[in-house]
Each structure stands twice: as structure tokens, then as C-alpha cells.
Image (spheres, rainbow, N blue to C red):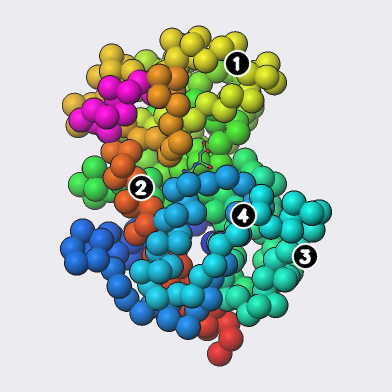
Amino acid sequence: MFSRHLLGLEGMSRLEVLDILDEAQRFRDLLDGPGVSSRDLEGVTVCNAFFENSTRTRVSFELAERRLGATSVSFSAVDSSTAKGETLLDTLRVIQSMRVDLVVVRHPSAGAASYLTRHLEAGVINAGDGQHEHPTQGLLDLLTLRQAWGGRFEGRRMAIVGDIAHSRVARSAIHGLRALGVTVTLAGPPTLIPAGIETLGVTVAPSVEDALRDADAAMALRIQRERMEQGLLASLSEYARVWGVNAKRADLLRPDGVVMHPGPMNRGVEISPDVADGPRSVIFEQVTDGVAVRCAVLRRCAAGMRRGRS
Ligand code: NCD
């Protein structure tokens, strides 16, 4: 029933998304109680292969694997033979030859995870591929929203603000939110809004105020400094002034509207510190939900892997 891969949320049905969220919620409840310690991944070997920096994604996958009883190892490109010129495929073939069942991969190239599924027998979980998708982040955002919204997605509206063009987080969130019937409004500097993004079923607001007004949630995205070097942004202070989610703007949300950020945050740029630490912020809920979602995804992919073998 389950696939051994998770590459993205594009094309995923409403029922499938809700099913993963239900399972993740069960793990989430366990995290609040005595803790998750199941044997769901006993006998399963997982390799976390990170060819790009990561804090929360990598740590939460590692914690989820340990909680579920997997045998897991991690490596990052900086301390591996990739730094000596080994290709992605060769590196992962080496890992698979050590009898790894699941590979969690983060890579700067869009399509890297999908490419690996064509060459490896292991299940592949995409932990972020270039500007394409970051499906476990999209799912954890939905889990956080489900709690904030009392379980009702239909009729809700979400504002996503910032660098949409380079954001795999935004792309996965859009696919997941649209599958659940949420209206999505984007806002950001015109140089950072991709042409034709409306084909994903979203609208683009002319200002951050327009996007946030009466929305049920806002997500601020990280502004990557290299975008200024590329001439796509004037300056960080100008960005904060025009697009930053500050207290005045957050108050345009509905009274119970929440503020999200995938991290890492540039405080004072895309989000002001008082909002990040304020009553509307669910940013640290998102991090906890990330462990629960990764437990659910790992369990499903491991089940898909075992079935493929039987
Ligand atoms: C993001 C990523 O790396 O895609 N972080 C994350 O996984 N929570 C967002 C970012 O780097 O801006």
C-alpha cells in the first residue's frame, strides 16, 4: 500500500495527506507523553545523506530514526568523499552496498532524490532537493496548522511571504495546502515571485498587508543573502521595511491567526523578534511536529520497502 519513496507533495491526494497527518499526530501525542519508543523500524538501516547544510531537518530525522529503533548513520558532504570529487550516484551506491534500506537525501540540485530512485534499490526520502520540494517540511507545516486550526482546513487562507522563487519549502507547502482545500496567497518582491506561479492554484498579492489581512496563518520565508549579490534584492533593511512580518502586520491576521517560519530565521529581516517570540508564533511547534512527521514518513517508507522485498 505504501511507496518506499517520498519525493514530493505534488500530486498527492487529500486522503493520502490526511492519512499521513493522522499517523504523525499519533506520534506527536506520544512525544508529549512518555515518549515515542516503538520498534517500527527495528531491523531497518537508514542513511541520512546531507549534501547541503541542515540543522533541524537532519537532527529530527536522526531522532525519529532512533525513537523508532532503526540503525542509522549520517554523513554530510563536507566530511565525506564528495569533497574529493565522488559523484552523488557513486556515493549513494557505496552507501547502498553497505545494505542500507532507506536513504534520506538533501541535495542542492532539483531532481536529485528522484534521480536516485532510478538507480538505487533503497527507498528514498527527499529532505530538500534544490528549489524543488521539501515534502516532510510541507507535512510538518500542515500538522502544525491542523492543531492551530482545530482540524479544519477547508475555507482557511494562508499567506506565504518572501522568496518564493528559491523556496522548496513554499512549493511543498503550496501543494499540501491546495490538496486540503486551503486558499494560498503569496507576497514578496516581484523579482522573487516566479512567473506563472498562479498555475499552482495560488494568487499573488501586491503587498504583504494585502496578503496577511484576514488570513488564518502567515509563513515568512528565509531571505537568502546571496539573492542580494544576484541583484534580486536591494538590501536587507529595505526588505524588512517592505516585506518583513512585524507586529503591526501580524495583527492584520484573523484574531487567532498564527505565524510560521521554517527556520533558520533571520530575525529582524523577514520576521521581527517580537513576532517570532510572540503569542501568534508556532515556530517551535513546527520543530516538534517535524519529529512526528518524520516518524510517520519513515515508518511508511520502511513498510513500502519491506513489501517490495516480499
Ligand atoms: C529550509 C531548507 O533548507 O529548505 N529549512 C528547513 O529545512 N527547515 C529553509 C531554508 O533554508 O531557508
Seen at 77% across and 65% down, the residue is 90
Residue positioned 53% across, 76% down in the render: 45
Q: Find disc 4 in the rendering and name its residue.
A: 76
| Residue 194 part of the magenta segment | no
Task: Locate residue 284, reporting x and y percent.
Answer: 31, 42
Which mark identifies residue 123?
none
Q: Position of residue 23 (x, y in %)?
A: 33, 65
Q: Main secondary structure of the magenta part?
A: loop
| Residue type, mark 1 in image | Leu
Question: What segment carries the magenta color?
Answer: 271-281
Residue 90 is tagged as 3
Q: Is residue 181 visible?
A: no
Residue named by callout 2: 287
**Residue type, numbered disc 3:** Asp
Determine crowd level at label 1: few under 14, some 14-19, many 20+ residues with C-alpha closer than 10 A: many
Q: CA distance from mark 2 to mark 3?
A: 32 Å
Mark 2 Cα shell of 10 Å, populated few (<14), some (14-19), many (≥20): many
Q: Compute the Cα span from label 4 to label 1.
A: 30 Å
Which mark sits nearer the N-terminus, 4 or 2? Answer: 4
**CA separation, marks 1 and 3?**
38 Å
When asked about the image quadrant of residue 208, the answer is top left
Image disc number at residue 233? 1
**Which numbered disc flags the more N-terminal residue, 2 or 1?**
1
Residue at 69%, 21% (x, y): give it.
Answer: 230
Q: Secondary structure at mark 4?
A: strand
* Front disc: 4 or 2: 4
Q: Is residue 273 visible?
A: yes
Q: Is there CB contact under 8 Å for labels 2 and 1? A: no
Disc 3 secondary structure class:
helix
Q: Does the CB distance between marks 2 and 3 fall below 8 Å?
A: no
Q: Is mark 2 within 8 Å of ligand 1?
A: no
